Image (cartoon, rainbow, N blue to C red):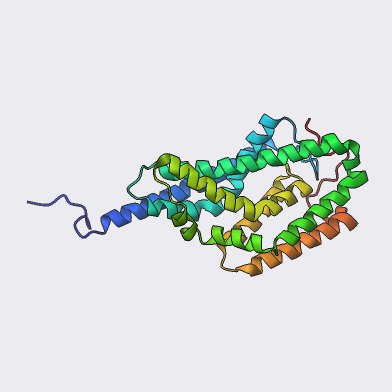
Amino acid sequence: MGSSTAPGAGDGLSPAYAAVRARLGLVAALFTLAVLGWVWAAHEMSGMDAGPWSGLRGLGWFLGVWVVMMAAMMLPSVAPTIALYTRLTQRSSPLSPWMFAVGYLLTWTGAGFVAYAVGVLAGALFGDALRWDHAGRGLAAAMLAVAAAYELTPLKDVCLGKCRSPLGALLGSWREGRTGAVQMGARNGAWCVGCCWGLMAALFALGVMSLSWMAVVAGIIAVEKTLPWGRGATYATAVLLLVLAVLLLAAPQMLPGLTIPGGPMMSAG
């Protein structure tokens, strides 16, 4: 009688192939979500770029936009980490990798809340002093310089190392179950925030509602996290940020895609 057994079912390779397919499917799904995030951002943020220190509107609106932005910008670069987590949890719930991603985005949501609070507080304390034609221009250039300096710090190096080689961090903070997956994702997100907060601050300084600058920052993050350039990538990023700071202060019209503000900065709307 002919056998209906699939090729490889008895040689022990099929489970491995199935696991690989599952991880590839997960990575593809994460990239699809990122693409959808970019499409949504392009639609919703069209015409909203007010340049450096754009108004943040209401908290609910800002956090909604922020979460979609983080999904679009961060999911591609964190996909290898989630795939590694999936490989380590082959016998766990199929939802565990997604709960890991939820925890990761929750940490970035918290970072967005802090950014909003700082923006609103600065607007309340300093008001029109933060206008572009007052202190806003110098503040934006200073923020870019701070972001450049952070690229060269030991803390940046440590956090980037956790993001580039996450196996040790995952095993050192292992938690079981779906709740554990959320906790581990949040912890990985914290390392990512520690790695990328300077670049996110640079995005605010260039225009948080600018799709072009959003793409530039996302590209830098992906290069630093995934390509085998090590510290060379952070040195190059520091130089780029310094060049942007100088141009923003001396000749902002030379920066392609930069919107020169004409109204009050950092307002909560």
Q: Is residue 32 visible?
A: no
Total numbered labels placed on residues in the image: 0
The furthest residue to the right: 134
Q: Quadrant of residue 156?
A: bottom right
Residue 145: percent from the left, percent from the top?
A: 79, 58
Residue 245: percent from the left, percent from the top?
A: 82, 57
Q: Nearer the viewer, residue 84 or 159?
A: 159
Residue 185 placement, left or right of 38: left
Residue 198: percent from the left, percent from the top?
A: 71, 53
Quadrant for the C terminus in the image: top right
Q: Is residue 234 visible?
A: yes
Q: Quadrant of residue 106?
A: top right
Residue 1 placement, left or right of 149: left
Residue at image point 69% right, 40% down: 114
In the displayed structure, 26 sits above or below 67; it is below
In the displayed structure, 77 sits above or below 122; it is below
In the displayed structure, 123 sits above or below 25; it is above
Q: Quadrant of residue 250?
A: bottom right
Residue at image point 87% right, 42% down: 130
Residue 19 placement, left or right of 54: left
The furthest residue to the front: 172
Residue 30 placement, left or right of 254: left
Q: Nearer the viewer, residue 75 or 153?
A: 153
Residue at image point 37% right, 52% down: 21
Residue at image point 69% right, 49% down: 200
Residue 149: percent from the left, percent from the top?
A: 75, 61
